[in-house]
Amino acid sequence: MSSVGVFRKAEIDGKSFLVHTLRQADEPTSSREVLAMDSHGDDLPLFLCPTVRVEFHILNLRKDDDGNEFDELHPYTCLPHFPSKGESLHDCDDDYHIISSCKLPVVPLFPSSDDKEPEYYRSKCGACGSKNMLCADYYVCRYCYQKFHKECVESPLEIIHPSHPFHPLRLYSCPFTNKKGGFLWFPTCICCEVSLSQMFYHCTACNFSMHPICAMKPVPFVVHHPKSHPHPLTFFPTQASTVCHICASIKEFDPTYICIQCVFVIHEGCMGFPHVIRISRHHHRISFTSSLPPGMLLSCGVCRQQVDNNYAAYSCNKCDAYFVHSKCALHPMVWDGKELEGVPEEDDEIDDGEPFQRIAEGIIRHPFHKHHLRLEIFRAYDENIYCGGCSLPIYQGQFYLCMECNFILHESCANAPRMKRHPLYPMPLTLKFTRMKDLFNPGGIIRCTGCQRFVSGFYYDALSSIKGSIKLDLRCASTVEPVRYPGHKHDLFMPWDQHEGTQCQACKEECEDSKFVCMECDYTICFRCITVPYWVRYKHDSHWLTLCDEEEPSDQPDWCEICEGKIEEGTKIFEEGNLEEKTLIWDRKKPKSERRFYKCSSDCCTNLHVECLVGVDVYMKSGKIVKDGVAFLPGFHRQSRSFRKNMDVQIRLNGSLSRPICDQCYCRCPFPIYFIGHDRTFCSWRCTQNARYW
């Protein structure tokens, strides 16, 4: 039995495949000879229990005196076949005997014809450790009672894969920890994206890994796929420099097929592209097209990079010159995975009618409030009036006022659709309202996924298979690209790689997710900063205040009229110091370089810190009662929840002349609202989360 696995041409159900088999030591090893071989004989070899191979592999590592580093990959030396009398377990000269109680070879496992989903399909493989990888055949050991994938049992020490014929793939294992005791990141299979540790194939020259099932899977030699191409497609083993006509990229390890008649190249993973889809970055459907207008400079509507006219892409039939790369359009963060060819467009539209019930002219009943609301016209600014939807003040325009209580809604918040789409996520979002004792929100407060602020009003919710539960407040949900931000002269777009760390130009913090960038200049702003109101009102100024990103040059220093601190210090930040001086910092993550403030548009010399005027908890409305101990900060361990005492926290309006002192940071509460809970006062929700209760 050989220690090298190769692929030979064979017939399966009348179709040509390249099938994995073990070759003899004297057989040729070149890629051309491998592809030209015929199928092997009908010998049925016996295989070891993989537990023996793993134990022998670990024993070898312990007895290795060459000083192997435990943060490197370790190659296997034990052969997969069951040794006959006088044979050793490996291809070295040393004679190691079987070190396990599994003295007999494994046997094939045949499922019952009446069992549609056998138990071993849900079992964890004893060799690779994966329970999500399914294959056609399994083995079982009659001594250790473990079940194994067929490919894991028969895995040779090396494989010459048709998609990677120039370098053999070696069987490796990955240690769980390094010498210092730190955990390591396991490699990921390039095909199925499963984490690998106990047994996998790896190429050290190209630095990629494959699961044994993926590495030993039969490769179709000829493929008929009329939806992708009208002619038969033939497997092409050397694809390192071949560009796919569908995705316009090179994938060295994805099986590539060609049509010599049409000079057409396609990856196996690119076959069967959907023809009509809907993406989150565009409001119309887009259709797959193999021919683009020649001579035009095209730009992708998702990544904003150039689209090559010589390759296929997606285009919009209703918008001129809107094109998207195929790989960008089918990304799971952009496409919801639904093929819409043959589906009427009206069936795919989100149309749930008006978001409220009309009782009479100017009188409605909103589903999130039990009383009737009457349409009113704004007359004078009142700092004590806040919207029950977005929790922001009523600055201008029309609003709905409850006819029985003090509930108020902006006209735009009342007209917020029940469902909508957002560029951040491909699935539709549903409008919801925070309530106490809700099944999925028992604390009456949620945290926005976009700006990371706490919300106690309206929000949009969806369930993402990639990011889990998605929650957006009304302002983040209404911020769609292109954004015409008043503080920048160019349009802003969402970048393709949201996880790439860049610095926000407003708050000077690293924003790794949910941000907007300018394609014409080096400008980045995060969701938290772009959703701050740009124009606001102040009770002691009759003019509008404008958000300024930089301090204007002046001979006299500007002072905030609320906290009486210097504007050049940015947000009200205190140095950590003596408790008696009451100068504990309330937010250690805010940098001192932040210089955003509100300034009067006239000559009133009114200057205010942003968070002194609108607060840090912008979307939490006074008068509500929420429960502490439910919403957690990043990095806050959920197991400590059992040591925290959940309590009701009341949100109060900070409108008195003598402002209370926070019992957590020992500072006077400078923000529009403060919190009362467990007979203690807090200036922000962060202080309530950082407080300890006994």
Image (cartoon, grey):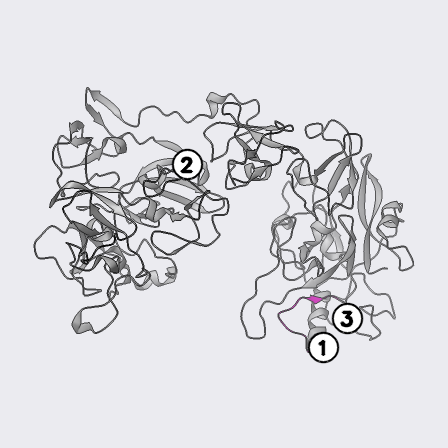
Q: Magenta segment range? A: 66-76
The spot of residue 67 in percent (x, y) is 68, 78
Q: Residue 64, which numbered label?
A: 1
Residue 314 lies left or right of residue 618; in this view the side is right
Q: Secondary structure at mark 2?
A: loop
Residue at which label 3 appears: 98
3 vs 2, front mark: 2
Residue at which label 2 appears: 482
With respect to residue 376, does 71 lie above or below? below
User: At 25% from the left edge and 54% from the top edge, which residue is drawn?
Assistant: 553
User: At 56% from the left edge and 33% from the top edge, which residue is drawn?
Assistant: 298
Q: Say which label, 2 or 1, has the lower sequence index.
A: 1
Identify which amino acid the numbered label 3 is placed on. Answer: Ile
Give the overall secondary structure of the magenta segment: loop
The spot of residue 599 in percent (x, y) is 21, 47
Identify which amino acid the numbered label 1 is placed on. Answer: Asp
Q: CA distance from mark 3 to mark 2?
A: 67 Å
